[in-house]
Image (spheres, grey):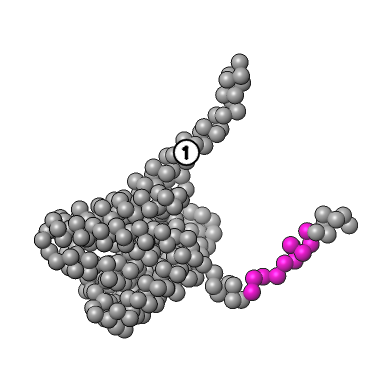
Amino acid sequence: MTPSTTAAQPTAASPRPALWKRVLDNRFTPPVFITLILLLGNVSFGILESYQKTLLAIVASMVTEMLLGRIFLGKWPHPASAYITGISVGILLRSPAFWPYALCAALSITSKYAVRVRGRHLFNPSNFGICALLFLASSSVAGLSIQWGNNLASLVIIWILGSLILWRAKRFQITATYVVSFLLLALLRAQITGDPWQAEVSPITGPMYQLFMFFMITDPKTTVRSKTWQCVVAVCVAVVEMLLRLDQSVYAPLYALFLVGPPALLIEIAIDARRKRRVAAGPALTPEIVR
């Protein structure tokens, strides 16, 4: 038996990760956190339309993900992303009917497979589905508009846990940049509109913003890779949101991400493609340069 064969054996026979490591898998952390937001928000302020509608959104999201993943990728996708999408739809959407929850969840997941460029989907799934229904079926649906009220305990718990999770995932800079930008622009809006600055700042304490800040704008699949440009995009989202708020748009943050996120990704994809073409053309151009 050669030394190389001997050295390879422990790797092949290496045991599975410990149970606690599998439980604390990064893919499971966001679903646990968003479930906490749901429970705290609903117990304290009744932010859900109903548990049944939220469950319908979750099931529709996960079933759509499983089917499309199997059809287009040839494998069963991990359910964590679909669960987050479904529960986000269940929290953020408002309708007296059941069908918008199923349709919105299905549209959200379908956007991951239908709107792709060079293997990357451009829209945050729940952001796409909710914006599509708010625009196309405004007579049947609305968005969440409930605040946390004066109970700071729920807000503090969510912000602390959310910040720790994002810090561990190395995406805290996105949310921090957005929050600072929002607060500064809120003061500017107060100067423009003449409204009290407290009224302009208060939306960031609502449940919709918790989901937006900790899940939508930090989605690893739909954000640019560079930390610097992640912060630049977060500032751009906050600026577009301010302009939409000045135009009395109730769902300004959702629309702002819908407008800013995909172009930022397209620019990054174009830069990557150009860089790859240069690398591929490099060896062929070298002899010409030498001559």
Reply yes or no: does residue 209 show up in magenta.
Answer: no
Q: Estimate the x, y position of residue 280 in percent, counting from the top left.
A: 56, 32
Would residue 224 be seen by someone viewing this image from the given angle?
no
Q: Estimate the x, y position of residue 244 in percent, counting from the top left.
A: 20, 55
Residue identified by numbered label 1:
273
Q: Secondary structure at mark 1?
A: helix
Would residue 201 be seen by someone viewing this image from the given angle?
yes
Reply yes or no: does residue 16 show up in magenta.
Answer: yes
168 lies left or right of 50: right
Image quadrant containing the C terminus: top right
Work out whether residue 100 or residue 192 is closer to the camera in this orientation and state it: 192
Q: Estimate the x, y position of residue 143 in percent, counting from the top left.
A: 24, 67
User: Residue at image x 48%, y 71%?
Assistant: 29
Work out whether residue 264 or residue 97 is closer to the camera in this orientation and state it: 264
User: Residue at image x 50%, y 59%?
Assistant: 70
Image quadrant containing the N terminus: bottom right
Judged from this view, the residue extending furthest toward the right is 1
* Res 211 quadrant in image: bottom left
224 lies left or right of 285: left
Query: Which residues make up the magenta segment?
Result: 8-18
Judged from this view, the residue extending furthest toward the bottom is 43
266 lies left or right of 24: left
Q: Residues within 10 Å of mark 1 (few under 14, many from 20)?
A: few
